[in-house]
Amino acid sequence: MNKVVLILVDGMRPDGMMACGHPEVEYLRTNGKTILEGRTVMPSVTLPCHMSLIHSVDPERHGVTTNTYSPMVRPVTGLFEQLDKFGKKSAFFYSWGELKDLYKPGALADAYFVSGHHHLWTATDTLTDAAIEYLKNEDPDFVFLYLGETDEVGHKSGWMSEDYTAAVNRAFGAIERVRKALPEGYVLMVTADHGGHERIHGTDLPEDTTIPFLAYGEGYAAGTAFEAFDIKDIAPTIVKHLGLPSDGDWEGKALI
């Protein structure tokens, strides 16, 4: 069994990741398992994509199709609730307030929110520092670190602009810091919720719906590639790492 750290870079396209120039990208690809042609859900919008990641169902099931949360008519157990049910310790570090609806009260050991509205690069550093300290001191079973600057820069300057790839580069600087600080027995996963084109996302264009997934640690052979990946596969994979079953409603499959 392995504990897990998941880092999500909001709005990160695979080609943006490959173009960002940070050596951590190549390090993770060389020393872990990767796919550049993963799939997110439609609509390719931040909150629906995160709901599908955490609940392992399509938006038709969880009912969230915009960045405004609405309670599920037929509730599906989320990743945080599944881990809590089996006594596992989870923490969430994030900078976009709408993500608070990803977890139910009591399911998390800790939630750490830093508003990134005006200073997203500061939020990235603050959240990364906090997550590293938490890993060192609290021995969590699962940590989810959300980095939101990339999406904001995409909307402001355009996906694949110089500013955008610079934001992806900064995200991988944070990822490198977390990877180097990982205690023994942890697996690191890196992904995105969606991509983008021009200054928008949410469509079914490949630029919006194609996401990368990188996994580093025990169980992921160096320099190998996944045959397929869907954002709904993340929750089943995490619980399997921790020796737990998937919820019966989940639609994704474990990647190990």
Image: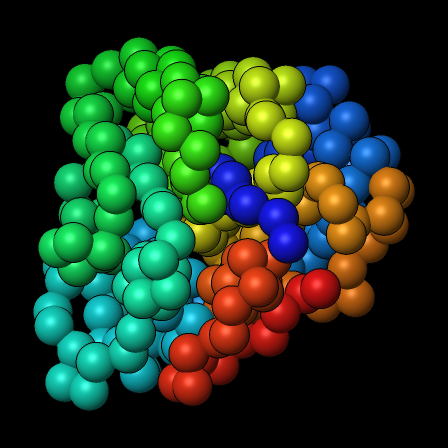
* 158 up-or-down from 176: above or below: below
Q: Which image quadrant is residue 228 in?
A: bottom right
Q: Nearer the viewer, residue 107 or 174?
A: 107
> Considering the image in quadrants, where does the C terminus appear?
bottom right
Residue reaching furthest to the front: 87
> Considering the image in quadrants, where does the N terminus appear?
bottom right
Q: Which image quadrant is residue 96 in?
A: top left
* 205 up-or-down from 120: above or below: below
* 141 up-or-down from 178: above or below: below
**x and y, in percent, of residue 16 in the image:** 61, 35
Q: Is residue 146 left or right of residue 166?
A: left
**x and y, in percent, of residue 73 in the image:** 14, 85
Q: Answer yes or no: is residue 11 visible.
A: no
Q: Nearer the viewer, residue 183 or 157?
A: 183
**x and y, in percent, of residue 74 in the image:** 19, 87
Image point (74%, 33%), residue name: 28
**x and y, in percent, of residue 210 in the image:** 58, 57
Q: Is residue 189 left or right of residue 96?
A: right
Image point (42%, 39%), residue name: 140
Q: Nearer the viewer, residue 101 or 187?
A: 187
Count up the numbered dots.
0
Image point (78%, 28%), residue name: 26
Image point (48%, 81%), residue name: 251
Q: How is the image coloured?
A: rainbow
Q: Is residue 246 left or right of residue 63?
A: right
Q: Nearer the viewer, residue 220 or 21?
A: 220
Q: Answer yes or no: is residue 88 visible.
A: yes
